[in-house]
Amino acid sequence: MRARIKDLLKSKDAKIVLVDLLMMLILIANLVLILFDLLFGSQMVQGLLSKYTPGFYEFYLREVHQDFFAIDIWFVAIFVVELLIRWGMAVKNHTYYKWFFYPFIHWYDVLGCIPVGSFRFLRVLRVVSIVMRLQKLKIIDITRTYLFATFNKYLNILTEEVSDRVVVNVLTGVQDEVQSGNPLATEIMNQVIEPQRTVIVEWLSHRLQFIIGEAYENYSQDLENYVELRIRTAVENNQEINNISKIPVIGSNLASNLEKAINDIVYNVIDQSVKDLGSPRNKVILDDLTHLSLDAISMREQDTKLDAVNRQIVVESLELIKDQVKIQQWKVKEETIKSQNNQENQDQPTTPHDP
């Protein structure tokens, strides 16, 4: 930070930084004086000052309070000169598109120069603008201050509370529309899914081919064992094959070969069918199946019972989302930090005290 300040003081921005620091001190002094004079106007403050500090009370009443407008005019004169200088520099450097843009953009500087009532407190915004410039030049770092951390904490809490209420109200409105029979699902199908049907079909077909290929490679042996078991059970329960096995000499071999032949035929048919289904050559078939599936989904509103179930699913899903939104995350974070701090304090070794 010190190296940054030294480099900045040697640069062309040094004068601007010094002016900003000087103006900040003047603004703070002026705002403190305005606030104190405002408090001094109350009878209670005057009574306390006259009782405990009569000398200061007489001096401030006679020299400052009665001539406060004239004193404030001197501050206003400084602010106006500084405003005109910055305006001239902005025009010279072509900071804005037109020369007359400056007073509109820096309206708080202009109105703060009016020495009347609440206009004076607009000078606080001038202090804020100077602080932001110093922050941008890395002269100061307000993000590490306790005031900024506190402000940012409560700003996040306020933002979360407001946004949560808005989201909950929106979701409640959607629930009401779904329960009242609003054809939301149909509109989603017609206006969102249908225009993208080609892309969806292409993606689903590709995924189906991939899934069929991968799954079949891993479970082909299980499928063969299953087919063999089913055929064996069917053969054992088949009376005709049992009669063949009773033929002397060749009956058992004939029945066994017949069972094996049936097993090979059935498994090869299933095996080749699955492989053909996952083959790129049969992509057209998968595309047609996907189209039929989407058509079936789009026609579901004709089924009143299924439509009621779908509405209930949507409503209950939105209710779960609302419950999640209602969780105060800022409170959860604070409790987590507290528990972590307590755990760290418990983990720290305690040093024994001397007797």
Image: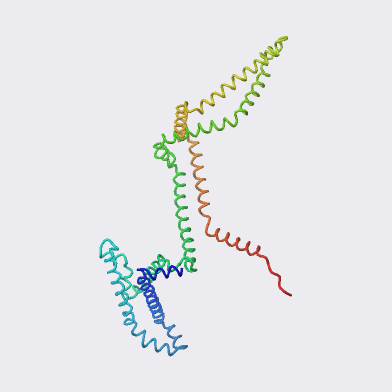
Horizontal and vertical percent for residue 120?
35, 74
The colour scheme used to paint the residues is rainbow
Give the residue at the far right of this rendering.
355
Image: 247 above or below 150? above
Relative to the observer, which residue lies in front, 19 or 26?
Answer: 19
Instruction: Give coordinates of residue 130: x percent, y percent.
Output: 38, 69
| In this picture, residue 115 sits left or right of residue 216 | left
The residue drawn where x is 40% and y is 65% is 136
User: Residue 302's x, y, as percent?
Assistant: 45, 33
The single residue placed furthest to the left in the displayed view is 99
Coordinates of residue 191 in the picture (x, y in percent): 39, 39
Number of numbered discs on residues: 0
Residue 105 falls in image quadrant: bottom left
Judged left or right of residue 2, residue 234 is: right
- Residue drawn at x 43%, y 42% is 184
Q: In which quadrant of the rendered image does the C terminus lie?
A: bottom right
Q: Is residue 194 above or below residue 343?
A: above
| Residue 189, quarter of picture | top left
The residue nearer to you, when weighing 157 against 9, is: 9
User: Residue at 51% across / 54% down in the picture?
Assistant: 326
Q: Residue furthest bottom?
A: 55
What residue is shown at x 42% (from left), y 40% (from top)? 188
Out of 345 and 201, give the one closest to the viewer.
Answer: 345
